[in-house]
Each structure stands twice: as structure tokens, then as C-alpha cells.
Image: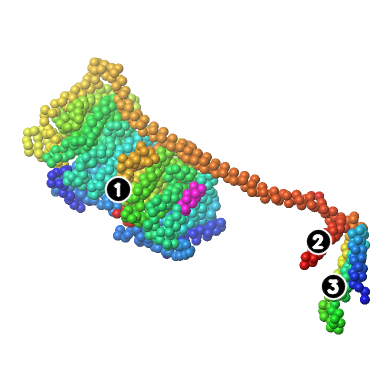
Amino acid sequence: MVVEEGIQVIEDKFLINSAILVILIPFLTGIFLLFLRGLEIRNKTKFSERLTGSIGVAGLLGSLINATIIIFTYFNKYDAKTQRVIGDTPFVSSAHGTFKWGISLDPLSVIMMFLLAFIASVIHFYATEYMHGDTAYTRFFGTLNFFTGAMFGFVLASNLFMAFVFWELLGVSSYMLIGYYWPKASAASAAKKAFLYNKIGDVSFLVGIAYIWQITLKAHHPTLDYHELTNLISNGTISINQLWFPGLLLFGGAIGKSAQLPLFGWLPEAMEGPTPVSALLHSSTMVKAGLFLLSRIYFTFVTVGGHYEAFIPEGDAALTATLITWLGVLTALCGALIALTATDIKKVLAFSTISQLGYIGMAMGTGQIHVGFYHLVSHATFKSLLFLCAGAVIHSVHSQEMKDMGGLKKYMPYTYWTMLIGLLGLVGFPFITNGFYSKDALLVAIKNSDIPLAGLAFTIALITAGITAFYSSKLFILTFLGTPRYDKDHVHPHKTGIRMRIALIILAIAVVIESVWWAVGSIGGLASEKINKSFWNFEYRLGDLIGIHGAPFALIDTIPSILAVILGISLAFGMYFYQIPFLISLKEGGFIIKLENIIANRFGFDKLIYVLAMGPGMWVGSKFRRFDEEVIDGFIINTVIKDGSLKLADYSNKLDQDGIDGVVNGLGDITSELGYNLRKVQTGQTSQYARWMMFGLALLLSIMTLLYFQTFTIK
Amino acid sequence: MIPVEWFLTLSVVMFVGGLFGVLTQKNAMRILISVEIMLNAANLAFMAFNGVFYNADFPNSFSASDFEGWVFVFIIIGVAAAEAAIGLAIFLSVYRNFGEIQITNIFTLKEQEV
Amino acid sequence: MELLYLLLIPISLALPTYLVGRWKPEFAKYLATLTILVTTIYNFILWFADFTNPSTNYGSFMYNYTKSWVPSVGIYFSVGVDGLSMPLLVLTQLVFLVSVVSSYYIKDQQGTYYALLLVLLTGVTGTFIALDLFLFYIFWELVLVPMFFMIHIWGGPNRKYAAIKFFIFTHLASLVMLIGLFYIYLEAYRNSGQMSFLLVDLKVNLNGVSFKTLALIFWLVFIGFVTKFPQVPVHTWLPDAHVQAPSPGSAILAGLLLKMGGYGLIRIPFWLFADVVDESGQHFFDSKEGHTIRIIIGFIGMVSMVYPAFIALQQDDLKRMIAYSSISHMGVVLLGLAAYNEWGINGAMYMMIAHGVISPGLFLLSGIIEHNTKSHTRDMSKVGGLAHKMPFTAALFVFMAFASAGLPGLAGFVSEFNVFIGLFANKELMASNDKFFIFPFLPYVIIPVLAVLSIIVTAGYYLWAIQKVIFLEQTDELENSTPAKWWEIQPVFILAIFTVILGLFPNTVWMVLDSWTQTILPH
């Protein structure tokens, strides 16, 4: 993306409008379907599946058509290397910085959008048959379309703000789809778990955005646009030494969404959703969102030099890249190891997804964005195919456990062949599969990178490739080969239905096309420089467009990975198909069993997160609750304030009654006592009264007389 | 001319006699009579002082103040008549209620025990 | 004059409503609904007429109406709106409209109830539009009375305790605030010699008062306002009041009464002190005192965001949980004010509006759930599988819960996002080497960090509640439940529509808020 001459921003109303349609059509059809679902509930009817399914698929086809128009127009009309089509409109505008809705068409987003539209259309088509007879058929398509719209929005976003908006919408629609069978306890809690794990990442993402905003604000150019940020870095306004920490936080978001270590626990649980959901969200698209984000913000952790070089910066800033790479490596290994022990066909694929996501993250961390993206494209294609095949198998035998399968080859030939194609891609079977070339590019990238302990990382990645080959073969053998182990009385495996079959075949063809494409580019590139520089060499061409080149394809580099794959496949066949006693005894050794237990418990990461997050969270919650009830409400309010004021009132009352009232009442008492005693004078004898009167009069008279004489004499 | 002291002495004797009667007699009729005597003692005193203080220097020019004593005497006689009438009426009704007019035996005005 | 209609229509119809209610109870509810519908429509007309022009400066008062009232001390009857109060005024009418419709279940003393509702409407409206400190205080206190009776008469089993607790908390705080208000008046008088309670006069007259005095006034009024929009540790009246109040009462309580505190806090200290400068030309909130204030309210806001979130995680009662989440969201408002930049303050104001449409919805929904359970309980351990028989209620609950947890595209997100952007863009709060003077081991940066982490907890308790109440198999409590009636569900639906509109097109309101904010921020 960063090229010496800088990026030219093009305004193209037509392309932008098409891109808006790509986002809006699935959204609107999704909301319309949910509205129909509301009508269904209200009127207690059900619209025909043909109608609602068609609306669902039509929404995606609309996107696909627009996406096709965009991808051809963009690459034909514009120089994808330097020109990108951007259109934006304010969403929340404050005076000194605006958050925008924006659409950016550049090589990465256009390719990703097309890939997504294609895979999602096929999966929708597949789901019309797979979900047949489900009571909430309409809701399924409504939510699935809503999800796809959110994913388009994320991919086409031109700035981190809009990316974050759709990122969260992805989380919610994923929640709705995992919890599709909501009356089931496991589905409900799986949905919750997925959302919470993602939310941890989301918070990290949010803080990352806020940090970037702060940094750009300090540089007097507040922005969240990818291209403006790249420009700011390339013209030296801000340096990578400021950005590595927000980069790390944004990667935290990617950890959650892309199920990297240690937040991968939700992905296998997410298999509670219907299989098309697993295929679409949890293997090929949504979980790629985090990695796609890394490819958009790579400027925060790798420095891109002028001559198609990407290198890890020196100093603190190297930490982010190192962390991304090593987490990727470890995730790849852990995912593959757990996939070994899983018995549920969907869980095997889920853990294999985690492992492959780790691979991609590893490549991104080394700065070889195009290599990561290369494998991302391969993986999206074959993994969606694999999930759809697994869905067909589950649909047929009504069980997800591999122990209930076996010998399905003769009942389900189409599924057999398409699954084989998909698994070969996953394994990376030498020279004929797309997975081989992209994985090889990954291994080369990690080998040549300058992160610490690159050699060890390379070795681990190689071992992972072997393990991948082993469990993929195991899955294949246990499902399609060997003798049937299902309950023959109740289960009658049937051919895959016509629409599902068509979907499988389309995806298989896509895998084959990619395989041929990659093979021609890589092998042909060895022979002719012309092919090497043409669009046939996807890796090289992509690197060219975004300004990074890795090491070219070389046969010598492929040898270790070929050996690892062949070893893995032959071990699996020896153990499960030919059942060689020596190999089986190896499997049943005590140490291996112990190891298996540890691995099957996912290395305790889930438990660790539970112990670290859930437990303390609840503990703090209960303590806070008690604090609220007992200290704030109980002690301060009830004891100190309420009881205290009551007591104070009591004392005031006492003082009032005993003190002030006492004096007044005492006076009253004395008066009435006096009166009581005095009334005995009243005898009723009139003559006595008269005597008293006389006596009193005489007294008065004599006093007055005396006084009169006194004054008289003085005078 | 009879000195005024004589009149006054007679008046005092009548008054004290009346008072004595009021305080000592038990029959209401007697008390009433004694009260009349006391009133007449007052009349006598009024008349005596009227004679002392009227304007003797100008016997032919009468003024209102020359007859102030007379005025009081007439009022008192009126009051005494009314009093006797009311008193007798009271005694009658007392007699009807109690069957006697001995005031020592009639003491319903006495404070009752609460 | 325009605003006088908004005040006079409800208050003059309160008594007729009561009388009509004595005669025919149903007529009272229709009369009250009609009244509030009229004021709502009128208010929306005002909004669309004068508050949709991006070039207007919304920092000055519109629809001003001033009449001298007590001239000897400078009390005026003065009303008016600006960019801060107009959105809240519209919100007031809206929340009252949905509350009055969802009150239709009340069968007891209807006339009194609806008359009190109209008085309450007058009080809240008056608080938002009063431009005179004295008038402001009158309306502020007027609100207490009808609310007290609403809880006390139509509340739950423990209603008397809750009503009295509510009254005492808020009334005591109001008295402290009153001291602050008089302090402002006297300081302005001493400073300028002009006796006036008018806000516009006070704003000018305060210029020159020492910053120490202003800080003291700030804390006095802060205590008054912060109790109304409760922050830890004066929040405990809120859960009780919410749990015991009838659900429309809870809706008004959460949707508007809390906002009165926030409005007062922004209007009185932040707007009133905005133009005060010292000799060196430094603004109050940029000075040393202002800096201390911002750090402390940031800390209070952080605690009020994190602490109730954890408590909500532990609640069994649905309404109590939502009440604690309300406290948590009001913490965001305080944090936005502490950030003191355009994103922070705009976000804080927007949070008041967003929470004003979201939380009434949640309270009304919990009321619907309560009415449909056998033993009229909201206990989350007993109620489960709501989506089986009441799908629309369940869907709206999930929608509103996500809105409250800050889902993008809905109203809550816009404000939360901006507040956090504002917090992290604030230089003082991000300084990792400045420590609290009370907690010397904590750097200031702990405020934004802990606050942002509480988002996870918020999502956590909502998800738990959804899982327990909405999902899973139906429990016995809900056996007799019936789909919600129109007057139960439509009000929530209206609120949901506004949540979406505010979330997708925030600029319609944001533009007004930002224009207002620019007038109080120093440049």
C-alpha cells in the first residue's frame, strides 16, 4: 500500500455506490426477513421456504453481482498499485474531528469482498436445503444475511471507526447465529461465551482506536483513515515508535475475533450453531476479520521500506510484530494438537481452523502481509468446502461424532470427492493443491524473517504441517473409509441433496481453480519471468500491489514441508486404515494418553480464562454487592444515618418532654393543687359568705382609711 | 339645728344593727328585713350629708347639685322595693323547693367533692 | 411564548384530569394521553422548525420569555432553550408519552395518578427550560412530590421505604445544592453589584470571582446534582426506588429524573463557569482547581461505572439489575465531563439522550415480564424461556439490552465511543506519572483503563440476563403468560425506533450538541 510516490485517492461515484449496495443489499434483505419472521410469529403461519430462502440467496447474489462489477472495474480501470477509490460521509462530526462512514476500494478489500460474496452466496444456497424444515427458517436467513452485510461493511471500511462498528455487529450476529437453537442450554451458553471472548478483544480494539486518535490529534491531524495514517507515517508526521502500542491493542482485538491464543476457546463452542453458520462465520469469513484487520494496520508493527521490503522495526516497536508472530506459531501448534484429540467432526475442523488462523497470523507478524493474505484466500475456500461437506455428512448420519461414521464413501460419492479435494487443500498436498503453495510461502516467510528465534518458529510451523496432515487423513479415513460404525437400524445414509451437492461442487471447483492458478503461477514462474510477474503469480502480484515482496517460490524450499506432509499422511493411514499394531501401540502408550488428556482440555486455557476472568469477576461482584448492601446501605445509611438520626430524635424528644415541658407542667400542677385545696372554703352557707365579705370589706376599709390618714398627715 | 353627727350616729347604729341581723339571723325573711334596715341607714346618711353640703348661701337659687342626695335616696328606695320583690319571690321558690327558708339548712352552693 | 405552552398545557389540565378521573376513570387516562400527545407533537414541531439548521449557533437561548417576578432581589420568570436543553426537552415529552400509554394497566385511583403524571411533566419540563436559578430550584423540587406519591401509592410491596428513601436522599442533596445556588447568587452580587438570579446575568457577573470560591460552589452544587443522577456512594436510593416504583414510574425515573441531575451539572457549573477567567486569562476548568475537580469527578465517574456493573452481575431481580446498569451508564456521563473536550462532553450529553430512550424501554419490558409471571416476580432464576410465548417482548428485550451494552448502530454506542475517545485524548488523564493524592500508588491512567474494561462486565450481565430470562426452556412461572398487549409493547417499540434513529443518524442531534459544546470549551 505504501509506495514511494504515495497513494492517489480517486473519487468514483459509480464504484462507491456499487460498494454501498454490496453492503446494503444483504443488510436490508436480512432485516426484511426478520420482519417477515415477526409477521410469521404474529400470524402463527410460516411463509414458504422457497420464498424466504430465495430472498436470502437473492440478497447475496445481488452483492455478488455488484462485487463482480467492482472487482473487474477496479482492476481494469485503475492502477491498483497507487490508486484507490474512497468515498466517505460524516457519521458523528464534532468541530475538531469527525468519525466517518467510509468505503475504501483497494486491492485487499476488493479481493476479500469478492471472495466473501462468492463463498457466502454458495453457503446460502447450500443452507436453503440444509435448513429445510426448520421452524425458524426465516430467522436463520435473516440473521445470516445481516451477518454477511456486517462482514462486507468491515471489509470495505476505509477507517478504523467504521471497521469497529461492523466488527461489533459481526460479534452480535455471530451471537445470534451460535445461539440459533436458543432453547438448548449448550447453544445459549456457547453464544454467550463467544460474545464475551470477542468483547474482550473489542475493548482492546476500542482502546487501540482511542490511542491512535490521541496520537494523531497530537500531530494536529486527527484521523482514523487507513490511507491517511499510512500517509502520516510515510511523510514522517508520526513514527512507528508511537504507533506500536496501539498496534498491539488492535492486535488484541484480532486475538479475540480470530481465535488466537489464548482467546480461542469460543470457536469450538461456536459449532453449536447450524453447520452453514460454522462454514461461513467460524471458518472462512468472520474469523478472518481479525487477520484482515492486521493486514490493514500493518503499518503499526512493520516498517515498509521503499523497495518492496517489510522489516520489523528496532526497539520497543519490535515487540508487537514478535508477539503477533509467536502467538501465531503457538496457536497453530495448539490448534493442530487439539484437533488430533477431537472426536467430533466439526470440532476437528474448528480446531484446524484455529491452527490455520495461527499460520496466517504468523505470516502477518513477520510483515509479509501478502503471504498471509495468500493463505487466507486458500483457507477460506477449502475450509468452507470442508465444513459444508461435514454438514452433509452430519445431515446424513445425524451425528457429529466420528465414531458413528465410517464407510460413507459408497453412499455419498459427491461428498466423498469434494471432501477429498478440500482435505488435500488443508493438508497442502504437494504440487497439486492451493494449500501447498500458500503454506509454502508462509514457511518461507517465517524462515527468512528477523523475529527472535525464527528457526524455532519455522520448526514448529513445520511440525504443525505434519500434524495437520495426520488429523486430516484421520478425519477422512474415519468418515469415508473403513467399515460403517453407525447404528444401521436407525440411520440410513443417503445421497446429499441436489442443492447441497451443487454448492459442494461449486466450492470444489473453486478450490481446483485456485490450485491450478497457484500452481501455474508458482511452477510457471520458475520457468518464465513473464508468468512470474503476471497475475498468475497471485502472491507476487499481490505483494506488488501492496508494496511488499517476499522470497520467490523455490523448489528447494518445499522439501521440508513435503516430507512433513507425507510423514503425517502415511502415519495416519498406517494407524487408522491399515491398523498396523506397532503404530496403534504407540498411540496407546501411557505418556501419549496423558498428553492427550492435557491437550483435550485445551491446555487449560479455557479453565485459566475462567479462573482469571469469570471467578474474580463474580467474586468482585459479590463483594461489591455485599459492600453496597451492608456498608453503604447497611452501615452508613441504616446504622449511621438512619439509626443515628432516630437516636438523636429520641434524645431531643426526651429533652423536650422532661426538660422544657416539665417546667411548664410543674407550674400547672402547682396551680391546680392550690385550687383544689382552696375550694374547701366553699361551704354553701350563705351567711358565712356574707361574713367573709364583711370581714374583707372591713379590712379593705381599714387599710384605705389608714392609708388616707397617712397621706393626710404627711401632707 | 340638729348637728349632723347625730344623724350619722343614728345611721351607724341602724347599719350595724342591720349588719348584725344579716350575719346572725337564720331566717331569710329576717335577713331581708335587716338588709332593708341597712339600706335605710344609707338613706339617712345621704339625707344628712345633703343637708350639710347644699348651697346655704343662696337659698333661693336652686341648682341640680342641691338635690344630689335626694336623687340617690329615691334610687335606693326604688332598688329596695325591687330587691324586696325579687327577694320575696326567691324565698317563695326556695320554700317551694326545700320546704323551709332557714338558710343554714340550704347549702347546695357548696363545692361538691370531685 | 412557545415554551409557556409546554408548561401551561399539562399543569392546567392536571386538575381537570383528577376531576374527570373521579367521574369516569378511563377518561382520565385518555385525557392525560391526549395532553401529552399534544405537547409531544408541539415539541417535535419546534425541533424540526428550528433545530435542524447546521449553521445556527445553538449556544444561545431561543424562545426566550422573561418577566420580572420579584424585582427587589432580581428573581425573574425566565424560560428558554439552547442546544443542551432542547434535546432533553424533546426526550422528556417522548418518555412521558410512552410512560402514560404503558400506565394503562393501573386500575387504582386513576384520576390521581394521571393528574400527578401531568404535574410531574410540568416539573421536569420546567427544570430543563428554567433560565433563572430560583425558578430552576422551584421546578427541581416540584418534581419530587408527584414522584414520591407515585412510588408511595402505586409501588411494590416495600414501596413506603423506597419512597421515603428516595425523598430523603434527593431532598437533602437539594438543600446542599440550594446553598450552592445562593452562594452563586451572592458571589455574583458581591462581584458586580447586580442583583439577579438570571443565568445569563450570573454567567457574566461571576467573571472575576476567585477560583477557590468557584471550586467550593462547584462541590456544593455537585453534591446536589450527583445524588439525583446517582453516583457511588449516594446511589443506593435508586435501586430501591426503581424496584418499588410502578414500571412507568421507573421509566420516568431512569429516563428523565436522572437526566435532570446530569443537565444541572452541565448547566450550572460547566456552562455557568465557562467564561470565568483569571488575570492570566486562564479558564476555570483549565486552572489548577479545575484540574483537581476533573480528576476527582473522573475518579467518581470511573468508580460509578465499574462498581455498579459488578453489582449488576450479582443481581437476581431484573429491574434491580437494570437499575444498577443505569448508575453505571450515568458514570459514563461523569467521565465524559471529566474528559472536558468536545468528544467527552458531546458524548456525555448524548449518553443522557441515548440512555433516556434505552433504559425506559428496559424498565417497561421488565414490567411486562412481571405482569405475566404467575407470582408477579422478576427473579431471573425463576423466569426463563420468555421467547417461547412472548417472542416480541423477548426480541425487544434482547434489542434493548444490546443497545444498552453499546452495540454500534444503536444510540448507546455513539456516546460510549465518543466518551472513551475523549477520555483517551485527555492529556491529564493519560499521564501515567501523575498519581492520586489519596491513592498514591494509582496513576490517573487507571481511570480510563478501568472504565473501558467495565464494558466487558456490562456485556456480561446483559448476556447472563438474556440467557436466563429469554433463552432456554420455559419455566413454570410463565405458564399463563400471554403475548403483550398493544399498549404494553408499542411504547417500547417506539423507543426502539428512536434508539435506531439516534444510532444511525446521530448527526441530527450531535450537530446541535456540538455547536453548544463549542461555546463552553476554551479555545
Q: Is residue A179 visible?
A: no
Residue C264: give x, y in percent of width and height.
42, 53
Report how far apart the C-alphas of labels 2 and 1 lie in the structure. Answer: 118 Å
The type of residue carrying mark 3 is Phe
Residue receiving disc 1? A28
> C232 or A255, which is in the foreground?
C232
Residue receiving disc 2? A703
Report how far apart the C-alphas of labels 2 and 3 lie in the structure. Answer: 27 Å
Residue receiving disc 3? B72
Task: Give the mark toward the camera: 3 or 1.
Answer: 3
Residue A539: give x, y in percent of width and height.
15, 37
- Main SS category, magenta section: helix
Residue contact at pointers 2 and 1, CB within 8 angstroms: no
Identify the element where label 3 is drawn. Answer: helix
Q: Residue at x 18, y 37 (%)?
A: A313
Specify whether residue C168 is painted magenta. yes
Highlighted magenta segment, given as a residue range = C167-179
Residue C212: give x, y in percent of width and height.
39, 51
Identify the element where label 1 is drawn. Answer: helix
The type of residue carrying mark 1 is Leu
For the C terminus of chain C, which image quadrant? Answer: bottom left
Report how far apart the C-alphas of labels 3 and 1 lie in the structure. Answer: 121 Å
